[in-house]
Image (cartoon, rainbow, N blue to C red):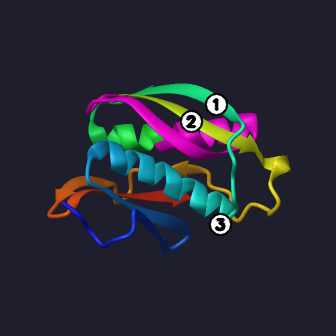
Amino acid sequence: MPSSAPDFETFDHTADVGLIARGATLEDVFVNAARGLFHIIAGDARIEPTRRLEVEVTAPDREALLVAWLNELIFHFETTHLVFAAFEIGALTDERLTATIAGRPMDELDEPLEMELKAATYHGLAVRVTDAGWEAEVLFDV
């Protein structure tokens, strides 16, 4: 199901920022949502990963799992001060995700960060199948 649409795009929403992620598979959508999240945080900064972490998140359904995944990434960003750029899904069901994430310390980046995000929210949250594959929409508190 090839598509000419970008893997992710951002949009403004009142005092929040939104993200739409797309992909041929659900795994692609979760990876592209993570890429979009760090694009919001770091803009177009080139990030060559130097450190890796293993993560696991669980939730009662796929929409809540997306929020848990993105909030887990924000948590690791805030606590490790790593800006993540590589996301490899190990396992994904509607209720559980394991992944390896890789990033670089923010003090090693050549450019300043663009925006601080507090959390992914449930407001307007959607994960759905489209004619082109999968799509997710999520809002972040800024």
**Badge 2 density bin: few <14, some 14–19, many ≥20, Cα 10 Å:** many
Q: Which residue is mark 1?
A: 52
Residue 138 vs residue 51, the one in the foreground: 51
- Residue 90 in view of the camera: yes
Is residue 47 magenta-colored?
A: no
- Residue 121 in view of the camera: no
Range drawn in magenta: 70-96
Q: Amino acid at mark 2?
A: Ile
The CA distance from mark 3 to mark 1 is 21 Å
Q: Is residue 30 above or below residue 20?
A: above
Q: Secondary structure at mark 2?
A: strand
Residue 51: image x %, image y %?
70, 33
> Which quadrant holds the N terminus?
bottom left
User: In the image, what residue occupies the spot 35% across and 50% down?
Assistant: 29
Q: Is residue 91 above or below residue 88?
A: above
Residue 126 left/right relative to 142: left
User: In the image, what residue occupies the spot 64% across and 30% down?
Assistant: 52
Counting residues from the N terminus, which is met first, the one under dot 1 or under dot 2? Answer: 1
Counting residues from the N terminus, which is met first, the one under dot 2 or under dot 3? Answer: 3
Q: Do residues under tags 1 and 2 come within 8 Å of each other at their CB atoms?
A: yes
Q: Which mark is residue 44?
A: 3
Q: Amino acid at mark 3?
A: Asp
Q: Secondary structure at mark 3?
A: loop
Counting residues from the N terminus, which is met first, the one under dot 3 or under dot 1? Answer: 3
Q: Is residue 37 above or below residue 74?
A: below
Residue 89 vs residue 58, the one in the foreground: 89
State the image quarter where residue 38 is shown: bottom right
Q: Secondary structure at mark 1?
A: strand
Residue 6 left/right relative to 85: left
Q: Which mark is residue 101?
A: 2
Q: Which mark is residue 92?
A: none
